[in-house]
Image (cartoon, rainbow, N blue to C red):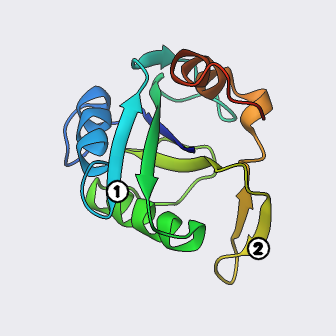
Amino acid sequence: MILIGLGSNISGPWGSPRQALERALVELDQFPLRLVRHSTVIDTDPFGRKNQPRFVNAVAVVETHLAPEALIQKLQAIERSGGRKRTIRWGPRTIDLDILDYHGRVLNQRKSFTRLLKLPHPGIAQRSFVLEPIAEIAPRWIH
């Protein structure tokens, strides 16, 4: 199972944060991705930096033939089309897409000069905004 976390807290080219999540779900169902199911969208407090608007979050299950490295590139391309600019860690964002789990694979490798691709996502256990949606759509999933 491939789990993707989605989040947004500021408007962008795709509209409001809720509209951005809905559009991202459509994008996650375009070849070479297939959206299997997704959680309900929840309204959450910001994580990390507290002085910013509240978030909307969800988790999706997708299928793809893409390897994790290619999948993260695809997700980042979707983020860019949704107006994502990476400026402040844990800062406001028009859309955020993270690989939470990729078929249970454990991975810790450099994906660029400055970033690492870590699987499963290292912050899952501290983030109720992904744990609650995972429990809804994949109750038997084990970290």
**Location of residue 119 by image quarter:** bottom right
Query: Which sits in the foreground, 45 or 138?
Result: 138
Provide residue 29's location: percent of width, then percent of height.
27, 48
Under circle 1, the secondary element is strand
Label 2, label 1: how far apart the Cα atoms are: 23 Å
The nearer-to-camera label among 2 and 1 is 1
- Which amino acid type is marked by label 1? Leu
Please report whichever mark, 2 or 1, sits nearer to the chain's N-terminal start.
1
User: Left or right: 12 with respect to 55?
Assistant: left
**Location of residue 31 by image quarter:** bottom left
User: Left or right: 39 with respect to 33?
Assistant: right
For label 2, the residue is 109
For label 1, the residue is 33
> Which mark is drawn over residue 51?
none
Under circle 2, the secondary element is strand
- Which amino acid type is marked by label 2? Gln
**Location of residue 105 by image quarter:** bottom right
Query: Which sits in the foreground, 104 or 93?
Result: 104
Q: Is residue 89 above or below residue 108?
A: above
Near mark 1 (Cα within 10 A), the count class, few <14, some 14-19 or many ≥20, is some
Provide residue 109's location: percent of width, then percent of height.
76, 73
Q: Is residue 39 above or below residue 59?
A: above
Residue at 61% in and 18% down: 135
Near mark 2 (Cα within 10 A), the count class, few <14, some 14-19 or many ≥20, is few
User: Left or right: 99 with respect to 15?
Assistant: right
Provide residue 11's location: percent of width, then percent of height.
28, 37
